[in-house]
C-alpha cells in the first residue's frame, strides 16, 4: 500500500485538530479571561531508504535518502498574553494587570483563573460563577493576616467598626483682637465616649483685658478652664484645655484684629459603624467603608504565579490546575514578586484575535483539502495498478 495514503491521513487528522482548536478559540471570543490556544505541527519518523556514505579517495560522500511518513500534532500552546479590559462598575469584578492568577477552591481542589467576575454568595464569600471560592488572607481588627494560610475571602455584611473615645481635639482660626471686653464666642463639637455615646463639647471664649478666657463643658457635667494670651497675634506655646478627658490644643489660634473664625477643626474618636460598601486596592486589599466614616481592611486577595504558565492544564470554567511542568504556585499579594496589580470594577476579556483565527481557519481548511487530494491521487494510482491486468 502506498505510503502517501497514510501521510494524507495523518495530515487530515492534524489539520482537523487545528480546526478544532481554532473553532474553540472563536467560540470563546467573548469569554472573560479566556486565553487562546495555537496548534503546532511536527513531522513523524522518516523511513531511511539509503544511508549516508562517507567520502573516499576516489568517490565523494553521499547524503541519506529518507521518505517522510506524515505529520503529527507536536503540541497545543496556550497564549497567556494580556486581554483587553472592560469596565463593569461592579466592585466585586477584578482584573489582573500583568502576570498572575486568582486562586480559587472548588471542593477540595485548588484551581487558578484569570476571570475575575466574582460575586458574594449567601454566606458573604466571594465566589466565581461556577461556585469556586476565592482565596486570600482575612483581616482581624483591620490588620491583614498575610503570610498565614489562605482562606475563603468573605465580605462580613454585619461587620461593625468599633467605637473610639475622643481624646484629642484642636482649635484653629482667629479670635478678634479688637473685640470688646466681655464679648463671647462659643463653639460646639461632637465627641464620643469609649462605648460610642455622643456628647457635645462646648468651648466658650470670653474677651478679657489680657486676652481670652476659655471655658469648656462636655454635656456630661465635666468642665475645664484655661486662658489665651497673644504676642504679635500668636498664642503662647502649649496653650490647651482639658475637658472630660479630651485634651484640646489651643496653640494654633491667632489673635489678629477684625477677623473672627475660631472653630474646633479636628478631633479623634468616633461612634460605632456598620459596613456600607467596599473597594479594592491595587494590591488586592478589600477596604470596607463604614457608616461612621471609618475605612479599614477586610481582607486581601491572593494571587499565584508560575514559572511556566503554559504548563497549566485547563480544568473548565475558565480555570486551570497546576501540573508537573507548570511548577509550583508562588503565592503572594498583587504587585509583589512579579505579580500584576488589580483593577476593581474591570474585567479582562478574551485575548482571541479574530483576524488571526479566521486566517488560521483558511490555512487549516486548505491544508485539509490538500491532504484529502493526496488520498484521492493515491487512490487513482492504485486504481491504475489494478487495471494493469484486465
Image (cartoon, helix red, strand yellow):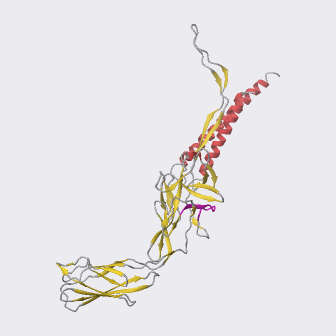
Residue placed furthest toward the left: 232
Question: Where residue 280 sits: x, y (%)?
Answer: 48, 64
Q: Nearer the viewer, residue 31 or 137?
A: 137
Residue 78: image x %, image y %?
57, 46
Please determine whether, in this image, residue 131 is positioned above or below residue 175.
Answer: above
Front in this rendered view, residue 246 or 264:
246
Residue shown at 55% from the left, 75% from the top? 158
Name the quarter where the N terminus is drawn. top right
In-front residue for pair 239/56: 239
Give the percent coordinates (x, y) of residue 116.
55, 59
Question: Bounds of the magenta span?
Answer: 126-137
The residue most toward the bottom is: 182
Relative to 249, does residue 182 appear above or below in the rendering? below
* Drawn side of residue 89 relative to residue 71, left or right: left
Residue 245 appears in the picture as rendered: yes
Q: Is residue 136 a member of the stretch shown in magenta?
A: yes
Location of residue 182 by image quarter: bottom left
Residue at horizontal 68%, vertical 32%?
7
Horizontally, residue 235 falls left or right of residue 327, namely left
Left or right placement of residue 153 versus residue 219 in this view: right
Quadrant for residue 15, please give it. top right
Quarter of the image where the C terminus is located: top right
The magenta stretch spans residue 361 = no
Amino acid at each position: 500500500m502506498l505510503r502517501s495514503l497514510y501521510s494524507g491521513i495523518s495530515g487530515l487528522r492534524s489539520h482537523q485538530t487545528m480546526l478544532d482548536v481554532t473553532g474553540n478559540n472563536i467560540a470563546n471570543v467573548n469569554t472573560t479571561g479566556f486565553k487562546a490556544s495555537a496548534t503546532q505541527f511536527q513531522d513523524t519518523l522518516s523511513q531511511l531508504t539509503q544511508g549516508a556514505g562517507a567520502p573516499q579517495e576516489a568517490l565523494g560522500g553521499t547524503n541519506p535518502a529518507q521518505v517522510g511518513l506524515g505529520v503529527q500534532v507536536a503540541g497545543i500552546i496556550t497564549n497567556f498574553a494580556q486581554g483587553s479590559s472592560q469596565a463593569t462598575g461592579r466592585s466585586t469584578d477584578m482584573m489582573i494587570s500583568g502576570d498572575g492568577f486568582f486562586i480559587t477552591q472548588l471542593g477540595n481542589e485548588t484551581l487558578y483563573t484569570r476571570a475575575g467576575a466574582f460575586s458574594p454568595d449567601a454566606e458573604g464569600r466571594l465566589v466565581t460563577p461556577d461556585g469556586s471560592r476565592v482565596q486570600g488572607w482575612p483581616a482581624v481588627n483591620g490588620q491583614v493576616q498575610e503570610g498565614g494560610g489562605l482562606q475563603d475571602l468573605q465580605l462580613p455584611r454585619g461587620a461593625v467598626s468599633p467605637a473610639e473615645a475622643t481624646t484629642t481635639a484642636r482649635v484653629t482660626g482667629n479670635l478678634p483682637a479688637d473685640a470688646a471686653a466681655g464679648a463671647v464666642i462659643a463653639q460646639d463639637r461632637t465627641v464620643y465616649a469609649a462605648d460610642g455615646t455622643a456628647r457635645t463639647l462646648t468651648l466658650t471664649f470670653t474677651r478679657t483685658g489680657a486676652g481670652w478666657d476659655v471655658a469648656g463643658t462636655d454635656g456630661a457635667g465635666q468642665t475645664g478652664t484655661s486662658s489665651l494670651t497673644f504676642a504679635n497675634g500668636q498664642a503662647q506655646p502649649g496653650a490647651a484645655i482639658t475637658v472630660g478627658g479630651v485634651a484640646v490644643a489651643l496653640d494654633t489660634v491667632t489673635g489678629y484684629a477684625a477677623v473672627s473664625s475660631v472653630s474646633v477643626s479636628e478631633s479623634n474618636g468616633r461612634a460605632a459603624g456598620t459596613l456600607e460598601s467596599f473597594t479594592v486596592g491595587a494590591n488586592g486589599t478589600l477596604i470596607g467603608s463604614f457608616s461612621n466614616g471609618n475605612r479599614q481592611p477586610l481582607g486581601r486577595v491572593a494571587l499565584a504565579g508560575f514559572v511556566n504558565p503554559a504548563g497549566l492544564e485547563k480544568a473548565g470554567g475558565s480555570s486551570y490546575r497546576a501540573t508537573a511542568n507548570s511548577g509550583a504556585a508562588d503565592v503572594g499579594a498583587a504587585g509583589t514578586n512579579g505579580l500584576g496589580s488589580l483593577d476593581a470594577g474591570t474585567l479582562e476579556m478574551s485575548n482571541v484575535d479574530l483576524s488571526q483565527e479566521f486566517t488560521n481557519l483558511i490555512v487549516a481548511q486548505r491544508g485539509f483539502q490538500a491532504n484529502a487530494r493526496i488520498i484521492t491521487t493515491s487512490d487513482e494510482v492504485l486504481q491504475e495498478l489494478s487495471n494493469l491486468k484486465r
